[in-house]
Amino acid sequence: AIARELSKTTASVLLLEGADDVTQGATKGNSGIVHAGYDDKPGSVRAKFCWPGNQMFPQLDAELHFGFEKCGSLVVARGKDDEKILNELMERGRENGVKNLRIVQRTELREMEPFINEDATCALFSPDAGNIIPYEYAIALCENA
């Protein structure tokens, strides 16, 4: 990603890979989840960059075609104790500048996910969360650099 950004300047860029492929190392252990930033500790470096980074993915995918899917995420509560945690995550998200977060109640949750566990009472919904195939993403960035 850094090599790609530097290649947009007048800098001369050389990318060296220590393994036999750019998809090795950290990339092969990446889950591919594009987090929205509601779980990060407010004030942390990760909290500062997670939401802005999330918002970059649609444009990056339009340019590089690596298969970003904006599918949203649900953190599901199964009772009052879990609901308290959802409210804490919602507040963290607000502190971190995350937009579009909301708590969906049982009826709407069942409309979204008809086969969800009967014990589910509500969920924190983040429509901006998504996923990628980490290998495709790493290759696309390197090819474009």
Image (spheres, rainbow, N blue to C red):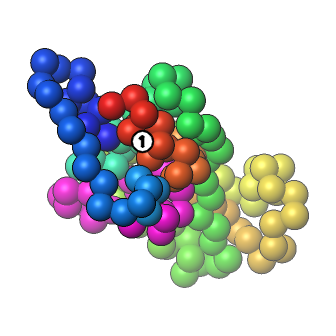
Taking 90 as reference, is 65 above or below it?
A: above
**Going by the image, does 84 lie left or right of 144?**
right
User: Where is residue 90, by image quadrant?
Assistant: bottom left
Q: Is residue 45 magenta?
A: yes
Taking 21 as reference, is 127 above or below it?
A: above
Horizontal and vertical percent for residue 66? 56, 37
- Residue 127, visible in the rendered structure: no
Taking 139 as reference, is 22 above or below it?
A: below
**Going by the image, does 64 lie left or right of 105?**
left
Disc 1 is placed on an element classified as: helix
Which span of residues is magenta-colored?
25-46
Q: Is residue 132 magenta?
A: no
Horizontal and vertical percent for residue 44? 20, 60
Please rate how many residues cluster around mark 1, counting C-alpha atoms within 10 Å: few if below 14, some from 14 to 19, many from 20. some
Q: Amino acid at mark 1?
A: Asn
Q: Nearer the viewer, residue 109 or 138?
A: 138
- Residue 116, visible in the rendered structure: yes
User: Where is residue 115, by image quadrant?
Assistant: bottom right
Residue in the image at 53% along x and 63% along y: 31
**Going by the image, does 55 lie left or right of 11?**
right
The residue beneath circle 1 is 54
Q: Nearer the viewer, residue 25 or 50?
A: 25
